[in-house]
């Protein structure tokens, strides 16, 4: 970042800190919002753009080779009149980054002259053309697009410090995408009676990146097709430089026919849940008493000052007052034993949790109960508690599903076939990957700023998509073209502009 920009950012920070300083607060006898006599006009020469961050992400897409790789590997158009494949793909991804929620929002971008000029585009595809492009996809074409994303993420991973490659966490789970459409090919009734699709999402737990999305009919089981996608994700992570890979999934993903093959590679570990069957229940019951150890879960966060008083548990009070049946967790114990699944040729390590429960009704305790939870792993070195905690960390993928549904709006079904909706999901989820790649691109500067840069990277990775859009996309800009340059002139100051300009400097290097 040059000195002039750094000085302007420092002045902006100083001004806002002065306005927010509580010690400089005069006595005011009227409300704080005092604006009146407001008028609107249309500018003649000055042109502004609300989503000023779009230029930074287009620069990122060009820098990592996303545009060229799409056009080189994806061939769906016989002639380019006037759009290329990359234009269609980025059109949907940029629409999500600009807070678009559906195909129809492309019309807003298409009729925004300043938005078009900011991207150097004469025109962009309209919603109908974008839908027609999605219908051109077959399963092989969608897999090609997934491979394109996996190819361009490798140089971004290569910029990370050595500790980044200690272990990759590959999480997999299915999620339901309901739809009210009656003419959509591939829809079916899910296990809970919902009509729609049942896509499989494979993600990298370290960064939250989407490694693969596979759309399936609504009545398909969660694990269907998961083994092929796991092999694809393993290949990408190992080529990317990760020294170890941990596969995580719930009970639906304990694909015992593939465990021996994965365990044959010493770099691959797995933790899968197993269903509680009568035989496994008996095996846990037969364990000696000294095999069980108390499971102590660590605190969610460290108190920096004084611990606060816990608020009243209103729901539990109502349950007691109305004498509803209530199940309360008293304690947890953990044990382990060797177990060989039927489809495997070797035994693995079974970790079992016993949850000790109290069944109550009102103020009266009816009886004590217990329930078992099983985890199968080929990790023979970690403690049972560590394996349980790492298995529980997979639940963070539920937050990813929520972001893909409610934030990015990638897990939707706006089209009329299974393959076209699959292609739509993959292209829009690219917006979420661009968010992760934006956070990963700036390298940590050695010295006194290293820890701060590391914290900024983790903060951006953990941001919800809506917060990310408001932070890095909703930047009011004046668009100026001159001297063979396309200038985005920011019109306000935010606390994240230092990271913005640091990332832009590294993108241009």
Image (tube, rainbow, N blue to C red):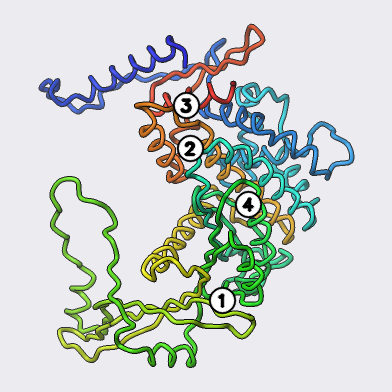
- Residue positioned 27% across, 53% down in the render: 301
Secondary structure found at label 3: helix
Secondary structure found at label 2: helix
Q: Residues within 10 Å of mark 1 (few under 14, many from 20)?
A: few
User: Between disc 1 and disc 4, whose residue precedes?
Assistant: 1
Q: Is residue 323 above or below residue 113?
A: below
List x then y, in percent, for residue 411: 59, 56
Alpha carbon distance from label 3 to label 4: 31 Å
Alpha carbon distance from label 3 to label 2: 13 Å
User: Between disc 3 and disc 2, whose residue precedes?
Assistant: 2
Which residue, given by chain and number where applicable, does mark 1 sit on? 193
Which residue, given by chain and number where applicable, does mark 4 sit on? 238
List x then y, in percent, for residue 335: 37, 79
User: Between disc 1 and disc 3, whose residue precedes?
Assistant: 1
Which residue, given by chain and number where applicable, does mark 3 sit on? 500
Quadrant for the C terminus in the image: top right
């Amino acid at each position: 970042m040059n000195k002039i920009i750094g000085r302007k950012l420092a002045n902006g920070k100083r001004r806002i800190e002065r306005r927010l300083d509580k010690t400089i607060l005069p006595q005011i006898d009227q409300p704080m919002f005092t604006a009146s006599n407001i008028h609107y006009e249309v500018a003649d020469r000055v042109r502004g753009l609300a989503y000023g961050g779009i230029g930074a992400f287009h620069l990122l897409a060009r820098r990592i080779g996303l545009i060229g790789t799409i056009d080189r590997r994806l061939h769906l158009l016989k002639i380019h009149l006037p759009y290329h494949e990359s234009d269609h793909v980025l059109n949907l991804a940029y629409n999500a980054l600009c807070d678009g929620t559906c195909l129809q929002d492309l019309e807003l971008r298409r009729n925004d002259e300043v938005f078009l000029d900011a991207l150097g585009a004469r025109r962009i595809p309209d919603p109908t053309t974008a839908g027609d492009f999605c219908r051109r996809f077959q399963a092989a074409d969608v897999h090609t697009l997934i491979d394109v994303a996996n190819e361009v993420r490798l140089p971004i991973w290569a910029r990370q410090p050595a500790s980044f490659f200690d272990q990759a966490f590959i999480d997999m789970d299915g999620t339901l995408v309901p739809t009210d459409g009656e003419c959509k090919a591939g829809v079916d009734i899910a296990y809970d009676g919902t009509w729609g699709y049942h896509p499989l999402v494979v993600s990298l737990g370290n960064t939250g990146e989407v490694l693969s999305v596979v759309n399936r009919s609504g009545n398909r089981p969660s694990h269907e097709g998961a083994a092929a996608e796991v092999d694809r994700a393993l290949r990408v992570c190992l080529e990317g430089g990760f020294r170890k890979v941990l596969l995580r999934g719930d009970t639906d993903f304990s694909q015992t026919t593939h465990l021996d093959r994965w365990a044959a590679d010493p770099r691959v570990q797995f933790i899968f849940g197993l269903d509680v069957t009568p035989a496994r229940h008996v095996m846990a019951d037969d364990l000696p008493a000294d095999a069980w150890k108390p499971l102590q879960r660590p605190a969610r966060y460290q108190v920096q000052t004084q611990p606060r008083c816990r608020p009243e548990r209103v729901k539990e009070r109502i349950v007691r007052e109305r004498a509803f049946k209530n199940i309360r967790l008293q304690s947890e114990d953990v044990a382990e034993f060797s177990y060989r699944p039927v489809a495997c040729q070797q035994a693995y390590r079974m970790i079992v949790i016993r949850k000790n429960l109290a069944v109550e009704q009102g103020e009266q305790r009816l009886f004590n109960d217990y329930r078992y939870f099983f985890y199968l792993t080929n990790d023979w070195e970690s403690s049972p508690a560590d394996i349980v905690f790492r298995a529980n960390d997979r639940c963070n993928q539920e937050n990813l599903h929520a972001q893909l549904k409610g934030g990015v709006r990638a897990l939707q079904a706006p089209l009329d076939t299974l393959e076209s909706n699959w292609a739509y999901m993959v292209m829009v989820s690219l917006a979420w990957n661009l968010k992760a790649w934006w956070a990963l691109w700036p390298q940590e500067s050695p010295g006194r700023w290293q820890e701060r840069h590391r914290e900024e990277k983790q903060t951006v990775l953990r941001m919800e998509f809506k917060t990310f859009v408001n932070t890095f996309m909703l930047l009011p800009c004046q668009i100026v073209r001159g001297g063979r340059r396309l200038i985005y002139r920011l019109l306000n100051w935010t606390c994240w502009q230092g990271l913005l300009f640091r990332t832009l400097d590294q993108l241009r290097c």
